[in-house]
Image: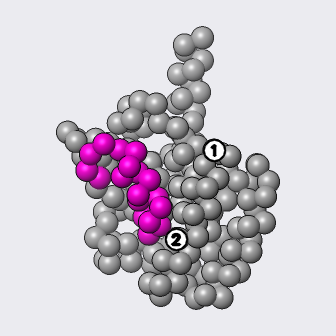
Amino acid sequence: MQQHRALILRSNRFLGSSLVNEGLISSADLNAANDTFMAAIQSHESLKTASILSILIDELKVLDEAKLLDHLFEQHSLGLIDLNYMELSSLPIPDLDPSLCRACLSIPFDKVEQTYMVASCYYMSTPVVKHWETLLDGNIIWYATSIASMHQSLQRLENILTAKEVEQE
C-alpha cells in the first residue's frame, strides 16, 4: 500500500472537496473526517483501509451512502452495480494489483472490445478517474458501488489471487 500512498492522499482529498462542492457534506464535516483520516494513515496497517468516505458514512454518520449513490446515478449518469454478483476470477486485467484497487476503491470488472467497465466508490475524485484512464488502454464506462460491495469484492479478489499463487507452487 505504501507505493500507492500519494494516490490515497490525493484521491481522498479530492473526493472530500467534491462532496463539499456538490453539497453532500459541509466543510465542518470534511474537516472532522480529515482529522480522523490523517490519524488513520499514519500506521501501515490502517493505510490499507483508510478512506474519507468510510469515515463520513460509518464513523461520523454525516453522509448517507444511499443518497450518495442516488446522486451519482442522477447527477453523474453512472450505473449502479453490486460487485457481489460479478465473477472476479477472469478480470479484464490479468495482473491487476488488488492494493491499487484498495487504494482508490475502484476495480475494473469487465471489458467488451476496447471498453472497460470500472466500479468505483471514488468516481467523484478526479485523481482516481485520471489514474484509471491512464492505466487502461480504452474507453471506460463507470459504475458506482457501495463500500461494502467493494470491500467484499476486493477480499474475494485477494482470495482468488492467493489460491492461484498456491496452485502455481
Residue at image point 35% right, 36% down:
92
Magenta segment includes 94: no
Q: Is residue 137 above or below residue 32?
A: above
Q: Closer to the N terminus: mark 2 or mark 1?
A: 1
Q: Which quadrant does the N terminus fall into? A: top right
Residue at image point 35% right, 59% down:
143
Name the spot of residue 156 as percent of width and height, x first. 53, 39
Q: Is residue 106 left or right of residue 140?
A: right
Q: Residues within 10 Å of mark 1 (few under 14, many from 20)?
A: few
The span from disc 2 to disc 1 (Cα, nearest Å) is 20 Å
Name the spot of residue 169 as percent of width and height, x first. 60, 11
Q: Is residue 56 above or below residue 79?
A: below
Amino acid beneath label 2:
Leu
The image quarter containing residue 111 is top left
What range of the chain is rendered magenta? 123-140
Residue at image point 71% right, 80% down:
32
Residue identified by numbered label 2: 15
- Residue 3: numbered disc: 1
Name the spot of residue 44 as percent of width and height, x first. 76, 49
Name the spot of residue 27 as percent of width and height, x first. 61, 87
Q: In this view of the protein, which residue sits in the foreground, 124 or 3?
A: 3
Residue 145 visible in the snapshot? no
Closer mark to the observer between disc 2 and disc 1? 1
Q: Secondary structure at mark 2?
A: helix
Residue at image point 52% right, 84% down:
20
Q: Secondary structure at mark 1?
A: helix
Q: Is residue 33 above or below residue 5?
A: below
Amino acid beneath label 1:
Gln
- Residue 110: numbered disc: none
